[in-house]
Image (cartoon, helix red, strand yellow):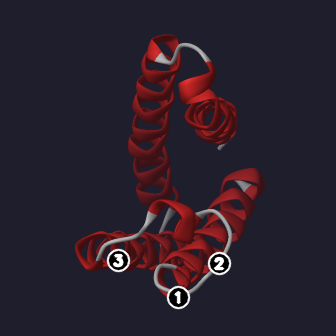
Amino acid sequence: MVFLDSLLYYHSLVEMGFAGYLYFAADVDFPVVSSYVKMPREVLICRNWASVLFCLGFVTYRAATSWDLEAKKELATVATGCWAMIAAANLNSLKKFKGEKHARDAFYCSGDLGLFTVMTFAYGAAVLLA
């Protein structure tokens, strides 16, 4: 249970922090985000997803600090499936990238694949150990 609480708590802080980064970095000359976000519509989409991510971070924070064990396990089980689906989508996309033209996309996609694979195992382990 301690691992699940810690995972939810610290992951909520990362989610809310990254949401702030996406929100404010969308229209300033900031690394990574501004290199992909050029048009006003893309800035709006980026900010919308940042808001959704912040909401998810807040829900995760509330789960870590005030929900009972069964509700935490249920949230973490759903999150495990989400992370696994995102990892599978990144693996599928990574298989499609060929050549120098897609080298940068493949680099980011492989990083996301690693991140979401680790998150899948971490959340799955937290549910099993709780």
Q: Indicate which label's residue lies in the foreground, 3 or 1.
A: 3
Label 2 near label 1: C-beta < 8 Å?
yes
Question: What x and y, as percent, mark residue 73?
Answer: 49, 48
Seen in the picture, residue 50 relative to 81 is either above or below; the reply is below
| Near-viewer residue (35 or 74) | 35
Q: Which residue is mark 3?
A: 43
Work out whether 91 lies above or below 22: above
Residue 48 image position (x, y, % from top left):
29, 76
**Residue 92 % position (x, y):** 43, 16
Q: Provide the residue designation for mark 2.
A: 30
Which secondary structure lies at badge 2? loop
Task: Tell which circle, 1 or 2, labels the residue nearer the N-terminal end.
Answer: 1
Who comes first in sequence, dot 3 or dot 1?
1
Q: In screen coordinates, is 113 left or right of 52?
A: right
Q: What residue is rendered at 65% in x and 29% in y?
A: 110
Q: Relative to 75, is 87 above or below? A: above
Residue kind at label 2, given as amino acid type: Phe
Q: Name the residue carrying label 1.
A: 24
Q: Name the mark on residue 84.
A: none
Which residue appears at 67% of the width and 53% of the height? 4
Element assignment for label 1: helix
Residue under the image location 70 percent in, 57 percent down: 7
